Amino acid sequence: MRVSHLYAPTLRETPADAEVVSHQLMLRAGMIRKVAPGIYNYLPLAWRVLRKVSQIIREEMDAKGGQELMMPIAQPAELWQETGRWDVYGDEMFRLKDRHGRDFCLGPTHEEMITTLVRQDVRSYRQLPIMLYQIQDKFRDEIRPRFGLMRGREFIMKDLYSFDRDDEGLNKSYWDMHDAYSRIFTRCGLTYRAVEADSGAIGGSGSHEFMVLANSGEDDVCFCDECNYGANTERAEMHPIEATKEPMKELEIVNTPNCKTMEEVAEFLGFKPEHAIKALAFYSDKGPILALVRGDHEVNEIKLKNKLDCLFLNMADATVINDLMGSAGGYLGPIGISKETIVVADNTVMNMCNTECGANKLDHHYINVNPGRDFKPNIVADIRLIRKGDPCPRCGAPVDIKRGIEVGHIFKLQTKYSAKLNTIFVDENGEEKPMVMGCYGIGVGRTMAASIEQNNDKDGIIWPVAIAPYHVIIVPVSIADEAQRTIAEKMYKELNAAGLETVLDDRDDRAGVKFKDADLIGYPLRITIGPKALKENKVECRVRKTGEVHLIDVDTYLSDVQALFKQL
């Protein structure tokens, strides 16, 4: 490809609405252009990267027995109504009607579609296991599309679905995909962690996220370097903390004027927050909820929602607190709370003694509170959010927490969809059973963006070789110079013939402009043909990642460039 013909309109200035590095650099490098919030055109350079990521995915999916197909984006409502998800999926679903008034959606995911497809044709245990996948656009009407390709409304996803006879088969498929995903992200040159995760709207009995570690990540990931445990902080388990045992004191109510926050109460009464009980009010489809954690801990709303099996869970407003809970905002506590309120206590709370909590009365708190004696929660569970330095739930070593970008997610669906959609097989004994399913997704565009988040500097993108749009760029300092132009053309043809994807910057422009564009786009190798080096029959070969410059002989350049390329 010649740069004079390459559709890559680079920008010198960073667009004001680009918040993260990948968004900024893809816009500046002429890789994407915005159509509407969360919707982008992929320009040729980006599309080359996406095709390379997709090819790596295809190779690893096929190696595990996956078969590629293509399903429609437009899905009839009837499929989603069979599983009950049409009414509960929420506003993220793009819904539309055809000319006959029939309801459809633009597929945010394809569990219903693939499950009904398989039920048409697969009936015997002899046909299992099956793994089917596609690489296709998905649509989700995000309330706040942002960060470029990180959170869009239209995006490219690889989704594979496994169908097995039993849990043993599902486990094999699941860990085969775990291995395949590890190979994919390693081949793409990413630093990542596979962590335990919440299954969310997809459901199922277990899942792992593949998180690329980057400061721009939307999720917090905790991990242990001692035992390799890792989890999204939404999912991370927390063991109860034991407290020092002491004789129970008599319960008292004390005046705490204008002390609403934990810090204010602790200072007024002279205790540390970890000695008190923090109460947070929520409202859900199950009614009002009072969640209790230790004063220095935070409620993990995902754990709480999952424990209650809620359709929705929101922070309660003053009306709920006053009218339904019978309490005063800032003075919430489990003693004397309305009977309609479901009280959920974290495991650690139940180990505390002679502690403090709100008295559900303006300007008053209880002291010498003892759980079990003074109040009995409806539910005791792990509802605490993990923090940096907390003990690892596997080995007890302190965990670290970093930001991560989710690029892949694998789920054990079990029979959640097959049972509802009557996707059954007949086993060797003639019994009908629902197929046991898994689903496995990779954000293709997200993988490209995550790579840029991890691989960049002040000058632009530094592509891992496996997914770089091109491998080499040739930059004659002056294309008008016949000697430079002749050598550039010769190298351009020979490098491409040798399998190195090469770009020739044939623009009649200043060398500095060409160098800036080459660094911005991030070609792994840059060959510069200039008058000084040519006097000695040499050209410069610069490695984008390290900045190293190698003077190589024009007569032996091909083997030298190939040797440098192999080291990348």
Image: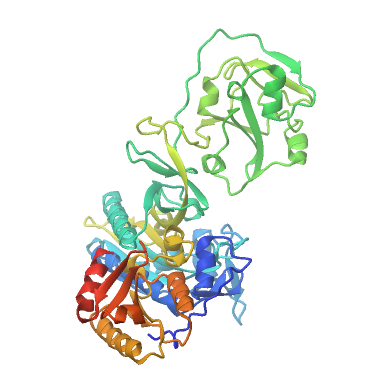
Residue 346: name its quadrant. top right
Answer whether residue 57 is visible to the viewer in this image.
no
Please name the residue shown 52% across and 37% down the image. Answer: 385
> Please, which colouring scheme is shown?
rainbow
At horizontal 48% and vertical 42% (from top left) the residue drawn is 233
Q: Could one spot residue 480 in this view of the protein? A: yes
Residue occupying image coordinates x 44% and y 74%: 515
Q: Count the numbered circles shown.
A: 0
> Where residue 347 appears, x then y in whole percent?
51, 27
Above or below, 368 relative to 77: above
Using the image as rendered, state which of residue 15 and residue 408 is in the foreground.
Answer: 15
Observer-nearest of 464 and 325: 464
Q: Position of residue 26 (x, y in %)?
A: 50, 70
Residue 336 lies in quadrant? top right
Above or below, comparing residue 60 to residue 295 in the picture: below
Q: Is residue 288 above or below residue 49?
A: above
Q: Looking at the image, which is closer to me, 384 or 323?
A: 384
Left or right, residue 231 beside residue 308: left
- State the residue at coordinates (74%, 39%): 320
Where does the image place residue 290, in percent across and percent down from the top left?
64, 33
Residue 481 horizontal/vertical position (percent): 38, 90
Of the 4 image quadrants, the one containing the C terminus is bottom left
The answer to whether 162 appears left or right of 136 in the picture is left
Give residue 317's quadrant in the image.
top right
Quarter occupied by the N terminus: bottom left
